[in-house]
Image (cartoon, rainbow, N blue to C red):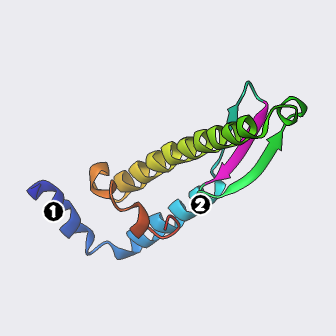
């Protein structure tokens, strides 16, 4: 714990590097796109690094199914896409932490506090 606090304190004098890394992080987050599928590809959802759904494709076979099944497929595909985005965000956050000299675990709960994630 004290080692992590020491790392944090050493960053106080490194404001320019931190700002540059955060800007780089924000740009990389904007580039993240992940796709989730369900029903053997009957439904596909794309989400971006801001956790926004940016695309939805429903295959002809899915349209022939009942309403509840289609709703379940959309939910499953959306959740899969968002999980993939979160995994990429975690990797980018860990990379940024390493670049500024912080242990990756220190940013674990700060997703909402990092500009571009909240």
| Residue bearing the label numbered 2 | 50
Give the quadrant of the N terminus.
bottom left
Name which residue lies at 20% across and 60% down. 7
Q: Give residue 97's quadrant in the image.
A: bottom left
Q: Secondary structure at mark 2?
A: loop
Inspect the magenta stretch and tell me whether residue 19 lies in it.
no
Residue 58 x, y percent position in the rendering = 83, 39
Identify which residue, 48 or 24, lies in the foreground.
48
Identify which residue, 64 or 52, lies in the foreground.
64
Q: Give residue 26's quadrant in the image.
A: bottom right
Give the vertical position of 10 relative to 29 (above or below): below
| Residue bearing the label numbered 1 | 5
Name which residue lies at 25% across and 74% down. 12
**Mark 1 nearby-residue class (10 Å; few <14, some 14–19, many ≥20):** few
Residue 96 x, y percent position in the rendering = 42, 55
The segment highlighted magenta reads: 42-48
Q: Secondary structure at mark 1?
A: helix
Residue 32 x, y percent position in the rendering = 62, 51
Query: Which residue in the rendered view is the most extreme toward the right?
Result: 60
Prevailing SS of the magenta stretch: strand
Identify which residue, 68 or 80, lies in the foreground.
68
Query: Which residue in the rendered view is the most extreme toward the left?
Result: 2
Give the vertical position of 102 relative to 85 (above or below): below
């Amino acid at each position: 714990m004290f080692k992590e606090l020491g790392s944090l304190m050493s960053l106080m004098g490194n404001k320019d590097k931190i700002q540059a890394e955060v800007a780089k992080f924000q740009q990389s987050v904007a580039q993240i796109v992940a796709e989730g599928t369900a029903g053997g590809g009957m439904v596909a959802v794309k989400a971006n690094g801001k956790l926004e759904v940016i695309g939805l494709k429903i295959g002809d076979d899915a349209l022939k199914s009942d309403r509840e099944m289609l709703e379940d497929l959309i939910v499953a595909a959306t959740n899969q896409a968002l999980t993939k985005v979160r995994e990429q965000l975690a990797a980018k956050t860990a990379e940024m932490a390493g670049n500024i000299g912080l242990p990756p675990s220190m940013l674990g709960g700060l997703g909402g506090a990092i500009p571009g994630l909240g």
